[in-house]
Image (spheres, rainbow, N blue to C red):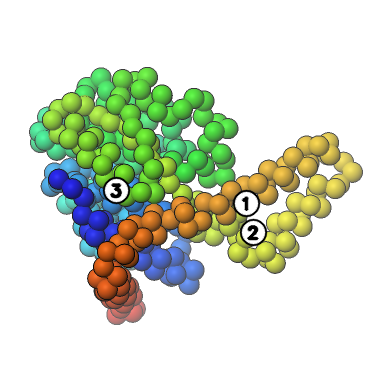
Amino acid sequence: MNPDVWLLYAWMLKSRLFEQAVARLWQEGKISGEMHLGLGEEAIVAGILTQLQEGDALALDHRGTPSMLMRGVDPVALLRELLGRPDGLCGGMGGHMHLFSPEHLAASSGIVGSAGPIAVGFALAAQMLRPGTVAVAFFGDGAINQGMLLESLNLASIWKLPVLLVCKDNRWAITTQSATVTSGHPLERARGFGLEALEVDGRDVLMVWDAVHQALGRARAGDGPTFLLASCAHLEGHFLGDPLLDMLRKPGMSIRKRLWPLLREAVRLKGASLQERVSAVTSVMSKVMAVQDQRSRQNDPLERARQMLVHRDKARLLDLESSTRLEIQQIVTQALATIEESE
């Protein structure tokens, strides 16, 4: 079985355009609260979900929109949920971090690391009730030190559960570099529990597909779980309105709101030593530069996938992109029309 690159790109593109539409609605004030998007994670999600079957289950983190969309959840109901409408997927009560679709055996949670125990529960049910099916957990590298996640790795291994544990590694836990708070390497930690552990470039959808094909085959055959460390980048920072990105996008506002207070405090006579102050300012600026690097075209999985197709059949590619944009426009129009009619 070989991957269908056109299908993979189509799923990634639909997710990207849907989330970009969500971002516009958030910026217009139609969606309230924080908004964590999966922009930059599309290759990881598509490379996995294109290989799932009926009866497989998903345990998602606070970036569950791409997975829900690719799993086949009604996009209008999904968008209505993000808009906080009573006719949304979860009655407008879950928002983007707590999405739930029993029909698709998919659930997300904003509790960091909770995808581990949820997926282990799904996998135990699969092992006992639905042999041949699997569960998948998605979590970030910032969750790798959570006790319940580590307990889940242990149970998955000792019970040989059919579960794929996917760590989406962008090397940041909000604004903390993961390497400064996590001892050792995540792969070695997973292997310490007796897990099969693989590392893959999560920006390359074909590499993800190949690694996952092997892992899912093992799980369905009863050969136990796999830990997958997939590198990626968050193209919009940790959340929409990320202050580190704002410092790049809106330098004028940032100088007034953030940089000037920071520099003013750095030169005060009282307080920490000059060396400590310089170190603090340098740390902030290095984080800003690191966020900028995350947003490079090289880190964009959609751009990488597109380059594989543009030379194969450019006309087909442009037609796919045009039709997908139209589809997303219709979804947004339908979701907003429901709001206008109810008001």
Q: Estimate the x, y position of residue 102 in percent, counting from the top left.
A: 19, 49
Amino acid type of the residue tagged 3 in the rendering = Leu
Q: Can residue 66 be seen in this view?
A: yes
Residue under the image location 43 percent in, 32 percent down: 144
Could you tell me which secondary element the residue under label 1 belongs to? helix
Give the labeled residue for mark 3: 206
Q: Which of marks 2 and 3 is nearer the N terminus?
A: 3
Are the residues at dot 1 and dot 2 in contact (C-beta closer than 8 Å)? yes
Amino acid type of the residue tagged 2 in the rendering = Met
On the rendered structure, is 324 left or right of 182? left
Could you tell me which secondary element the residue under label 2 belongs to? helix
Disc 2 vs disc 3: which is toward the camera?
A: 3
Real-space CA distance between mark 1 and mark 3, rounded to the nearest whole angstrom: 31 Å
Give the labeled residue for mark 2: 247
Give the labeled residue for mark 1: 288
Residue under the image location 62 percent in, 51 percent down: 289
